[in-house]
Amino acid sequence: MKQDQNFQNILGQAQQAVDDANSAVIASKKILEDNEKKLAADRLAYDKAQAKIDKAIKADADDLTLKTLQFLKAME
Amino acid sequence: MRVQEYEEVIDGAKHNLDGRLAEKMEVNNKALAERTACVEKNRFQAAENSSKMKGLREQRMGVETLMKAGLEGAILKDARATIAGLQKRIDELDALNDDLGKQNGKIGKEMGKFSQDNQKLQGKRDKLFPSIKEKAWKEKAAAGDQREGKDRGVASISASVDDYGRVVMDRINGGKVVLDGERLIVIAGNGNATENQGEEITDEELNVFMGDGSVSELLNAGAHLSQGIIQRMQAIEEKRRLDQNRPEDAVDSHSEPAAEIKGEKAKKHNLEEIVSKWNRYVNEDMPEHDKVKYKIRLDKAKDDPQRLLGGSDAVTRELKKRLAKKFKTDSAKLDKDIINKVYNFLRELNEGKLNY
């Protein structure tokens, strides 16, 4: 009887470990999901930020081209 | 448009592009920091999972040992069910660790791309201003030739403009001082060189280059000078004129930067306001996890906080001075990215974007 109780205790501890590990499963799934969402949002923000700078660089380049043409015309 | 003006346009465009490329690098750095946070989070969770798996395996071994002892009936059934439950959880965690690792691998590839992009961007910036790249060896060379700014070429003999449009002065004790665009290069008699750019060049040094003449004389001689340097030299001329017309007993209460004497249209800010705006700018411009952010915040201005700083030159000098003090270095040795941040701050300040 005492031995049975001991067996039950060991099985109980094992079941407790299974339940505890469940929190790690849930946390892992949540982290993976959150990361995917965050990365998707970050990628959008990144592309937007880089595109904004590229646009500014293009505007600067266009401005320089215009000034260069003006300069060349003035030099004629 | 004159050649001189066009050269200024080119010079300005180069600086603008450098600033834009620095911005792109900052965006990459921000992305890198964000990805690093994700990777760390995954690693931490994977370690946590591994620890749980280890515990589960130990429990499974315990139950298996029990079973070997000869269980039967309902307990044997419970033991088998428990082992199945333990194994299921172990497999789940193992698969999740696999997923966390795969996600990290994917993020790692992105991070590699951002790092590569930054290397390419830095390469482009170095090509724009090769002198900055060369600065390291020049500083190294100058290490054995520590001099204060006032010694840099002040004891010169005369200035002349060479075929490349550089203003060149011979030093009494040997060597040369060269003003090229907005760079001041001091070559000591032993060949060691130091370089300063833009705001790092003092009005005193510009004054010496002008000698008794004027900036227009230098330009007429073909000197290639940046718009900023020309404006500062013009301000020095104006100051000279004011000094000549000043009554003998007039007291020069303080030495305002040359740019202010000309009466810039720029709004004047007091020191307290500038420090506060800078800290706010740094706070909003940089990501929370960027450690540099905390390093470049400035302490509240306690020394004469109401002192007016007129114009960009004075604001730049004050910020650089305070940042240099914080980094326990001198203004000329501040990190290029920090100096760029100061210039970006000024640009936004002048464009009226910092309305807080």
Image (tube, coloured by chain):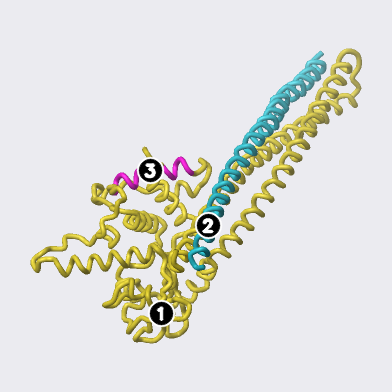
Reading the image, the residue beneath label 1 is B161
Looking at the figure, which quarter contains the C terminus of chain B? top left
- Secondary element at image label 2: helix
Q: Is residue B255 left or right of residue B101?
A: left
Label 2 resides on the chain identified as: A
Looking at the figure, which quarter contains the N terminus of chain B? bottom left
Reading the image, the residue beneath label 3 is B352
Q: Residues within 10 Å of mark 3 (few under 14, many from 20)?
A: few
Q: Do marks 1 and 3 both belong to one polypeptide chain?
A: yes
Location of residue B36 by image quarter:
top right
**Could you say which chain is coloured cyan in the image?**
A
Mark 1, mark 2: which one is toward the viewer?
Answer: 2
Residue B96 disc label:
none
Q: Residue at x 28, y 76 (%)?
A: B213
Task: State if disc 3 and disc 1 touch (CB < 8 Å).
Answer: no
Q: Is residue B276 magenta?
A: yes
Reading the image, the residue beneath label 2 is A64
Q: What is the number of callouts on the image?
A: 3
